[in-house]
Image (cartoon, rainbow, N blue to C red):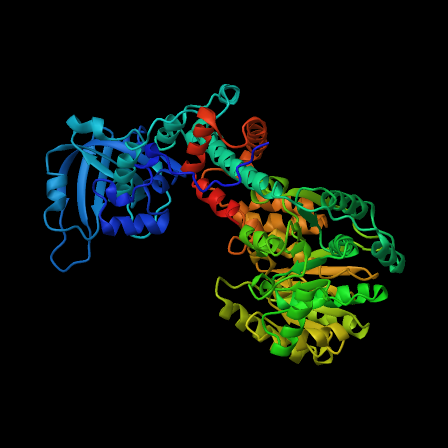
């Protein structure tokens, strides 16, 4: 079967050139407006067209003036009766009095210049005015009408007007003109959607849909389920699935190598453990070993909730590689996590006589040289490291397996780089952030997926309660008895805003307060701005029990394993996302004793915050929590948009269009089965689609490695 090993030759089709022009190519869009447009949605014509309306103004409502609803948008024909112009230097607005047979209205202008108002609304003239009306001192008034036209120009007044998200300095009028010019550049393209899908959903052609989304005629037209919007969402999902399938096709068909050990080391490891694997762990290990023994390269995602035993599954896959005389590497996002994994694996591998290596960016030169030499000559069979593993200085003797932990902290590019550190390297990607199925298909569609959906025996659910922050003194009082009983406690400080510095200040303040209130706890502080050594010392004090209370920012979200910790307090829980709270809660309950999580919140709560706290109290199931999180937030936020390699959709909303994702994937699979190289007219149509969503660049970039 031919594969699209090289998509470097995908060129943007000529018919799309006018869409990928700068917005300055549109009439009336100069540099100043272009900067505003670029800030809000991007600098190309296609970016402007993908900026969809979020609401609709109905200008057909023409109520009698004596029956106007306060705050409603109205359109009325009136006769101008007089002007009240304030004296020079006064801050009073210009007030225009007007009337019709149903009543009176005052039209108000603040900071009006010169004779602008007199020209717009001359005394004695009839005018149609449209805008938001209010009752003020028993009179109807309209401040700065959106439209003022003479009756003979009534046709120029839009009956329905879309409402768009704007940025400071960008007016609806300016955006409207730019969009009107942009829609004139929409070409007619040959259809790429299967005809039966178009018929089933009653979808318009792409060019029609693109125009119709900017010309809504009723409220339902601006909802995600309207035919034009659904159609465009499907196009975006189809482009995403096609790009991922092409990458998977070209990556997995790169010649792999059969990795099939004799099972000796794995048997020794399992015999040394004081427990058995769960059914879910056994199932996932079987799937991984089958991939490793295939001649195709493995690209597999393993999702497991906090504490489900992913590390052990990965270790069994690594031992399979070592049994064949080859090497394995584990890439992790932070030095804390790398050290922790190194300690865990060292402990587990000791009975087997294997000593794993550790490679960090900040290491003594002599230590680093020793590890690099061991990796290069094959003495170091397993190495755990941060981004330092991806540098050119790292040369493996014979790498068989690359494991990427906490994948959402890395982009797709990095997992490919690790896969290129040897010949036909298998790649296993692990995450403790359960990913909603739809999101896994869009962000990780180039990987096969496994789920560890059982907890090891003995792991108890964490009891979760929520309290208002005003009761913090009661909480501290209760902590005294917990500390007296030898408990260890996490206290997570709030996310203040995007600023790291303010987060740190809040944590330092809380640390001082808790040290004063609970001196017996010997509280330590950990935050992201500390140097690695100071942070590690504080963590070590908590791990060993010298300190019973760890005050921290979300730096402890992943990779801190203290089985003795039984209480997790999350301050200002209303500011955290569901997935993040669940990750933090997973830091406790790792031992045999029962554990508690306390969510301290500041009221009044928004509807979303209330829903999040309620779900946290009800469920310990990470997969259910991930699905709920997707409904309550946008998909980019679920994984953390700044860190994740997940796609940001402009037209598709995964909470509304999940069913379309399945259909898109099926269409892609059906097509690539028959035409993997995108040949012929049908292939050309799909290349147009990839180019339209700039996934042609993604395919070139990714398959280029």
| Residue 98 appears left or right of 380 | left
- Front residue of 112/645: it is 645
424 versus 53 height, above or below: below
| Residue 319 appears left or right of 656 | right
| Residue 582 appears left or right of 287 | left
- Residue 143 visible: no
Instruction: Residue 30: give x, y in percent of width and height.
Output: 22, 48
Instruction: Residue 177: give x, y in percent of width and height.
Output: 25, 38
Name the residue at 52% across, 45% down.
703
Number of callouts: 0
- Front residue of 567/356: it is 356
Image quadrant in which you'd find residue 584: bottom right
- Residue 580 visible: yes
33 versus 19 height, above or below: below
Q: Quadrant of the N terminus?
A: top right
398 versus 678 height, above or below: below
Name the residue at 28% across, 44% down.
23
Image quadrant in which you'd find residue 466: bottom right
Instruction: Residue 704: give x, y in percent of width and height.
Output: 50, 47
- Front residue of 574/207: it is 207
Instruction: Residue 162: give x, y in percent of width and height.
Output: 35, 35
């Amino acid at each position: 079967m031919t594969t699209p090993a090289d998509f470097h030759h995908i060129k943007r089709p000529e018919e799309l050139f006018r869409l990928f022009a700068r917005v300055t190519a549109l009439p009336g869009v100069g540099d100043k407006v272009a900067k505003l447009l670029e800030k809000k949605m991007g600098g190309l014509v296609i970016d402007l067209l993908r900026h969809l309306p979020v609401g609709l103004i109905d200008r057909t409502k023409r109520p009698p003036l004596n029956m106007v609803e306060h705050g409603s948008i109205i359109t009325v024909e009136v006769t101008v009766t007089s002007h009240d112009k304030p004296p020079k230097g006064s801050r009073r607005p210009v007030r225009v009095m007007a009337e019709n047979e149903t009543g009176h209205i005052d039209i108000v202008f603040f900071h009006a210049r010169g004779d602008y108002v007199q020209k717009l609304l001359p005394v004695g003239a009839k005018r149609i005015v449209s805008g938001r009306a209010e009752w003020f001192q028993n009179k109807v008034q309209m401040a700065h009408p959106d439209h003022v036209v003479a009756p003979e120009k009534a046709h120029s007044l839009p009956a329905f007007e879309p409402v768009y998200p704007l940025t400071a300095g960008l007016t609806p009028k300016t955006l409207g003109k730019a969009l009107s010019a942009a829609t004139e550049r929409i070409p007619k393209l040959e259809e790429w959607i299967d005809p039966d899908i178009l018929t089933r959903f009653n979808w318009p052609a792409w060019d029609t849909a693109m125009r119709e989304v900017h010309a809504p005629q009723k409220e339902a037209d601006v909802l995600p389920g309207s035919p034009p919007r659904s159609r465009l969402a499907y196009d975006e999902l189809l482009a995403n699935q096609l790009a991922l399938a092409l990458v998977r096709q070209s990556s997995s068909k790169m010649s792999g190598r059969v990795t099939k050990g004799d099972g000796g080391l794995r048997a020794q490891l399992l015999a040394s453990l004081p427990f058995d694997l769960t059914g879910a762990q056994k199932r996932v290990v079987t799937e991984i070993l089958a991939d490793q023994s295939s001649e195709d390269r493995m690209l597999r995602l393993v999702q497991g909730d906090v504490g489900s035993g992913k590390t052990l599954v990965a270790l069994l896959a690594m031992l399979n590689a070592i049994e064949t005389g080859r090497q394995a590497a584990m890439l992790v996002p932070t030095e804390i996590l790398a050290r922790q994994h190194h300690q865990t694996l060292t402990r587990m591998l000791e009975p087997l006589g294997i000593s794993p290596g550790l490679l960090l960016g900040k290491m003594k030169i002599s230590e680093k040289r020793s590890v690099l030499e061991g990796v290069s000559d094959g003495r170091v069979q397993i190495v755990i490291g941060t981004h330092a593993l991806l540098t050119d200085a790292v040369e493996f003797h014979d790498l068989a397996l690359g494991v990427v932990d906490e994948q959402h902290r890395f982009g797709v590019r990095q997992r490919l780089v690790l896969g290129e550190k040897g010949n036909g390297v298998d790649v296993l990607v692990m995450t403790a952030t359960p990913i909603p199925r739809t999101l896994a298909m869009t962000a990780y569609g180039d990987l096969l997926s496994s789920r560890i959906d059982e907890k090891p025996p003995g792991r108890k659910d964490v009891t979760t309660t929520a309290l208002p922050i005003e009761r913090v003194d009661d909480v501290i009082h209760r902590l005294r008895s917990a500390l007296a009983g030898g408990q260890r406690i996490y206290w997570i400080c709030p996310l203040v805003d995007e600023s790291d510095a303010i987060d740190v200040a809040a944590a330092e303040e809380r640390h001082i307060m808790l040290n004063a209130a609970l001196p017996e706890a010997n509280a330590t502080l950990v935050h992201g701005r500390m140097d690695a050594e100071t942070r590690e010392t504080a963590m070590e004090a908590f791990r060993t029990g010298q300190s019973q209370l760890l005050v921290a920012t979300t730096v402890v979200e992943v990779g801190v394993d203290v089985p003795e910790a039984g209480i997790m307090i999350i301050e200002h829980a209303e500011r955290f996302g569901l997935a993040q709270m669940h990750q933090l809660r997973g830091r406790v309950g790792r031992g045999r004793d029962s554990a508690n999580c306390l969510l301290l919140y500041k009221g009044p709560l928004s509807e979303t915050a209330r829903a999040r706290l309620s779900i946290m109290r009800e469920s310990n199931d990470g997969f259910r929590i991930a699905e709920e999180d997707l409904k309550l937030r946008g998909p980019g936020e679920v994984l953390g948009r700044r860190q994740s390699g997940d796609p940001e959709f402009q037209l598709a909303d995964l909470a509304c269009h999940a069913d379309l994702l399945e259909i898109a994937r099926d269409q892609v699979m059906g097509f690539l089965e028959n035409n993997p190289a995108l040949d012929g007219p049908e292939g050309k149509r799909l290349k147009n689609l990839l180019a339209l969503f700039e996934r042609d660049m993604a395919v070139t970039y990714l398959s280029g490695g």
